[in-house]
Image: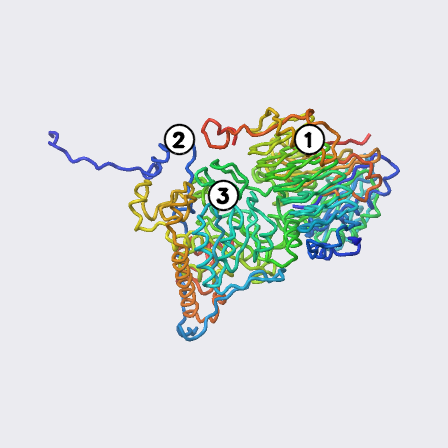
Amino acid sequence: MCGIVGLFLKDKTLEPKLGSMLSDMLTVMCDRGPDSAGFAVYGAGDTTRVKLTLRSAKPLDDVVKDLEAGLGVAVSAVLRETHLVVTLPADKEDAARAWLASTRPEATVVGAGQRMELYKEVGRPDAVAERFGLAGMSGTHGIGHTRMATESAVTTNGAHPFSTGADQCLVHNGSLSNHNAVRRTLLREGIAIETENDSEVAAGYLTWRMREGASLKEALEASLKDLDGFYTFVVGTETGFAVLRDPIACKPAVMAETDDYVAFGSEYRALAGLPGIETARVWEPEPATVYAWERA
Amino acid sequence: MPVVDLGTTPLRELNAALHALSKDTNETHWHVINPQGKHAVAVGLDAPVTVEIQGHVGYYCAGMNQHATVIVSGNAGVGLAENMMSGEVRVRGDASQSAGATGQGGLLVIDGNASARCGISMKGIDIVVKGSIGPMSAFMAQTGNLVVLGDAGEALGDSIYEARLFVRGEVKSLGADCEEKAVTDEDRAVLSGLLERAGADARADEFKLYGSARTLYHFHVDNAGAY
Amino acid sequence: MTAPVNPPRTVPRPSATFDQYTISEIQRAAATGIYDIRGGGAKRRVPHFDDLLFVGASISRYPLEGYREKCGTDVVLGSRFAKQPIHLKIPVTIAGMSFGALSGPAKEALGRGASALGTSTTTGDGGMTPEERGHSSILVYQLLPSRYGMNPDDLRKADAIEIVVGQGAKPGGGGMLLGQKISPRVARMRHLPEGIDQRSACRHPDWTGPDDLEIKIEELRELTDWEKPIYVKVGASRPYYDTALAVKAGADVVVLDGMQGGTAATQEVFIENVGLPILASIRPAVQALQDLGMHRKVQLIVSGGIRNGADVAKALALGADAVAIGTAALVALGDNDPRLEAEYQALGTTAGSYDDWHEGRDPAGITTQDSALAARLDPVIAGRRLANYLSVLTLEAQTIARACGKTHVHNLEPEDLVALTVEAAAMARVPLAGTNWIPGQGF
């Protein structure tokens, strides 16, 4: 139960402003979800390296030095409050995760991918965006979420976005009615689900479908059959951005598209500050219809 | 002519001032600027005044309106003019879902599009949408008139009672127990009157009329599939 | 051995699984093709307040003298945000029941009885009648999914507003009023054709979920200039989450209705198989309030199977601020009166079991829109009966509170209770009598 924002840029010259645009949108959605907030930003990256976003309540001071010593490769890192984004050679991801699990159990890998960085914390969304410096980030697309917790706990682990695969993340407004059964299926299929949150199940479901060869659009279409309840999903992948509402579509959703961007908001006011919104095509996504965009 | 800037004035002050107006007030024309998508703007009015809002409003703008005219130069959020009793509400832009929900009277005019569930459970309100309406519109509509110059989404008029639905464009699908009806002279007169009041550029003979097939009025086992 | 002459035979053996009622229901369904619809709440046996006992006072605790030493019963509802909170003299309120489901005289009688004791009545699905407003000194106005008869003038006339998300008899279901009860006046109030089967919605038309509810509450507060307390009523389904979310969305009062709570009409299968008993619902709801630091700040009204002052005291001891009664209030007015047995027999039922409230043929004149039947109920006499009953509930609750040494019924606490069964101990989170064991805790 929450507020969602999403922004997918078509105009490259806007990329340095992605964070500030997304931050403004997120701040407007504060009162839809005062418990916690999170966002994912797709920034720079390349195929040879992977970014791991680590979150830890304790300081992660010597992680970079120790990782370099442990793996024998160069590691770079950016620290933002409780989150540390470490970048290392892609072929060392598994080794890095294993090393972290054994030597830094207090750190959680909240997201991983070539380009995605993912931040989430308990607290008012505007304060969370400020703490992590969202306004200063650049990228091609990003999604954000403000959460009013329903059945799962108000914890950072329960905050959105949820990432269950490389460069994949999902935010959700609504309430799934069959997530326990789907979670059991996904666990059998080897998808790691770590919380009791229904939204993480939705993220894991898409990861599973895409692992089996579906495109993002196909995975979302399949979810119409397999995920029951009320939902509006906004999903990011390394190159794509997609939106889906359930067949009843009670939870609010507004989209806007111009030559420069595609934007999503739970309410129109989240979009009202975007450049050129006056002449944008503005619409509410149809029920049970997948809207997807891919970077050229 | 009072001008209220919601960028600096709390919403509570605006609504309290509007509620304090007597039926014979001289302050009959209000301007509201910088609504910034706020919810519950100009709800519960009960005096024959005009409130013009410059910008976008959030949920429930002009909710339960009586006697007043509320004009929004912008887009409106969920539940625009919900349960309106009388008066007039006009939106220059688009309206989100459940516009005019359960409205019992008055006229709601939307210059742009209205999304899902427009006129849900309407109980006597007249709604004119110059653009198109979304899915599940006029769900369980009881009485009143819904006029759509553009198209209607899926399941129009599902479980409808005695409301009249006039649509000029395409209807994607009709809901359970909703069917096309022959247009009587009385229907045409009602429609013409609404088009004129709404300032809509359309002729009554361009519209089709949809209403209740009345097969769900009393339960019958052979209709169980429609529930 | 030769076969005995006239050997003894076994007597006919009814099936425990396919009992007489079950068989009759299969036969009825096969003949009609429609589920059984009825009024009232769950009739099956569920763990209830009967399985709890107060321990009372003796040497370690000192009791109060009955009749002489004061034991307060008043309750304030809506002190969180409302400018005009409600002050009730007794912690027993009358639950929402519509004009339409009930006759005009029945609604009037409820208003008279409640007002005499300084407590509130509640409208229902169908709006507020002038008679009801006139006879209820404190009136709670319900905002329901169907919005039948919803009117801003009445919102402003109400003393509190209750947003109904669900009710205990059918959490997740909408209302239903069959053709027999859609009289010309009911039809006019609800904007429906006369005599049709009314199907009520199960979700509100313009909001879904707690984030939208918060905005809906803001609208209602703005509409009524932040004067009226705003209640949120839920059927007992997930009481911890629902209570927490109602509080987060800005409610002043949470109303929690257990599965024994009545309805004017819905499917028997719904009444008997969906929702939690009230006994199992109170502690999770109170826990949610306590976790949010809101216990006694946001008040909790519970309902569903309250019958006597002991039930009232037990509900309060488990953490409720007040209770609401519906079925018991109708019985006090005269519902299911054995003096009408011949007429109940003619309807194919018996006094004590009559639940076809939706058919509108109530010989007691309560659940009907037939003017001749409705005229049988004298609202003054029936109102007096309700007032008597409310007095007894209050006196009984005070008797128990005094015996536990409390100068106010709100000072009853779970530690004043023990349970007779393991089930009740687990649900009420009080120890099994004579032990320190609270099943289900610490696992």
**In this rendering, which labeled residue sits more in front, label 1 or label 2?**
1
Q: Which of the pair B194/C172 is nearer the observer?
A: B194
Outermost residue, right side: A13
- Rendering coords of residue C440 (x, y %): 48, 54
Residue assigned mark 3: C186
Residue assigned mark 2: C32
- Rendering coords of residue B223 (x, y %): 49, 28
Give the class, few, some or many, for how many residues have Cα within 10 Å of label 2's Cα (few <14, many ≥20). Answer: few
Q: CA distance from mark 3 to mark 1?
A: 32 Å
User: What amino acid is at disc 3?
Assistant: Val
Q: CA distance from mark 3 to mark 2?
A: 27 Å
- Judged from the image, the secondary structure of the residue bearing numbered disc 2 is helix
User: What amino acid is at disc 1?
Assistant: Ser
- Judged from the image, the secondary structure of the residue bearing numbered disc 3 is helix
User: Would residue C267 appear left or right of A32 to someone viewing this image?
Assistant: left
Q: CA distance from mark 1 to mark 2?
A: 46 Å
Give the class, few, some or many, for how many residues have Cα within 10 Å of label 1's Cα (few <14, many ≥20). Answer: some
- Judged from the image, the secondary structure of the residue bearing numbered disc 1 is helix
- Rendering coords of residue A259 (x, y %): 84, 33
Marking on residue B192: 1
**Is B173 situated above or below C300?**
above
Mark 2 belongs to chain: C
Mark 3 belongs to chain: C
